[in-house]
Image (cartoon, helix red, strand yellow):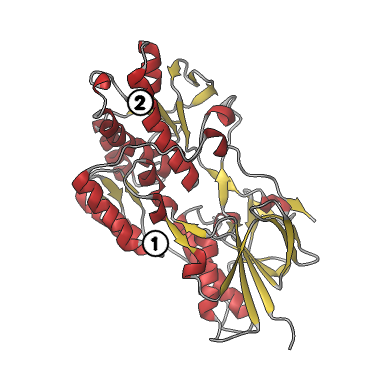
Amino acid sequence: MGQPTRVVIVGGGFAGYQAARSLARALPKRAPDVEIVLVNRTDYFLYLPLLPEVAAGVVDPRRVTVSLPGTLPGVRLVLGTVDGVSLEERRVSYTDPEGTRHQLGYDRLVLAVGSVNKLLPVPGVAQYAHGFRGVAEALYLRDHVIRQLELAAAADQPAEREARCTFVVVGAGYTGTEIAAQGPLFTQAIAAGHKELKDQKVRWILLDLAPKVLPELDPRLSRAAHRVLLQRGVEVRMRTSVREATHEGVHLTIGGFLPTKSIIWCVGVRPDPLVQATGLKVDRGRLVVTPTLAVPGHPEVFACGDAAAVPDLTRPGEITGMTAQHATRQGALAGRNVAASLGHGRARPYRHHDLGFVVDLGGAQAAANPFRIPLSGWPAKAVARGYHLLAMPGNRLRTAADWVLEAALGRQTVQLGLVRSAAVPLESAEGARLE
């Protein structure tokens, strides 16, 4: 009996997870001739949209992590970070969590490596800011916010207290807006336990060079989110960003200085460095693919999600956005098209109309446009939470239970000290090698 056909999927995010699941389902039952291997640096799928609620003490971090081996039957998990691809030899190189390098051959390859923090050439940002792309970063931010208020309560100097009670969020997209909206509710709960902070103003400041918050959304939703931020005391400063970051605070592009110990970097994302290292053609930093998600000239290689410049057939001449909605659907199609390339089914092009977006603003507030119907307040909140529960591949009941407990009992405000600053540098993605 010959070796089975091996399909290697790189990345266990929205696209990679769905690719593995749909491929396993598309193959005939008990098909020993195909081996599905998922290479990922963790043994869980991370549901990114709920990370702001983890950082704000609403949701337990275990709720946003879904076991890969526990929810992907028929898929072999390989723990490691892929740092090299040999297209000629059809193999990938990866490093396991203990630092040992390995090689893995493939007959079909799905690149779903996703994205990393987008860094701008701003002095000091890499040293003094922290991103928001993983559980460790969310836990670090949660502890950091609590710690700053506790240190402020013990500070003798008003200037130090003010700096520790000032939180600067850079980037008014989905993540930055949600963090800035959740922040005041979280710090209010923390400050309530410190009588020393009774008259101390806790500032949350949202910066962006864009003319409005949530520039991707319908203007009505952007205005609704802006109103919520202002109602919570967030200082929204559009057309403004960081010129330089220092240990004492940030210098602004429009002039002025903000003393702070907290710089939360949510400017955006860029494709994983592995994309460039493949040597394949890219468009805006993403791998060029056909509408069926195959790489031109390499029919054995597929790409999807943030790593791929997928033609948007609903908007000729454009490529699909880097959103979880597209990544999820592209991943599912990639799995089916890989199965088709192995003789099971027929390859289809990717075509998807956006179903709308949701932005959870904490408390009873949200903004949503399901099927392009703009909503805010409680209706949007119901849509947002319903969407998240449907989109999550697991932990739905536990997540809903956390929401109920937070509403009934309030937020827990104890720092655990599990993640140190050095463990979550803003620039954490290492370059990849082409062999």
Question: Residue 322, how many percent across, how many down?
Answer: 51, 52
Question: Residue 94, how many percent across, how many down?
Answer: 70, 57
Badge 2: few (under 14), some or many (20 or more) residues near its Cα, within 10 Å?
A: many
Q: Viewed as shown, does residue 286 lie left or right of 263?
A: right
Report, in whole angstroms, how far the alpha carbon at label 2 lies from the one at label 1: 34 Å
Q: Residue at x 25, y 29 (%)?
A: 193
Q: Which residue is label 1 attached to?
A: 392
Question: Residue 172, how many percent across, how many down?
Answer: 41, 37
Residue 279: image quadrant is bottom right
Q: Which residue is label 2 attached to?
A: 150
Element under label 2? helix
- Location of residue 358 with respect to 19 vertically, above or below: above
Find the residue positioned furthest to the bottom.
Answer: 1
Question: Residue 72, how many percent across, how many down?
Answer: 50, 71
Q: Amino acid at mark 1?
A: Met
Q: Viewed as shown, does residue 126 lie left or right of 369?
A: right
- Residue 168 in view here: yes
Q: Which mark is residue 426?
A: none
Q: Quadrant of the N terminus?
A: bottom right
- Residue 316 in view here: no
Q: Viewed as shown, does residue 265 lie left or right of 298?
A: left
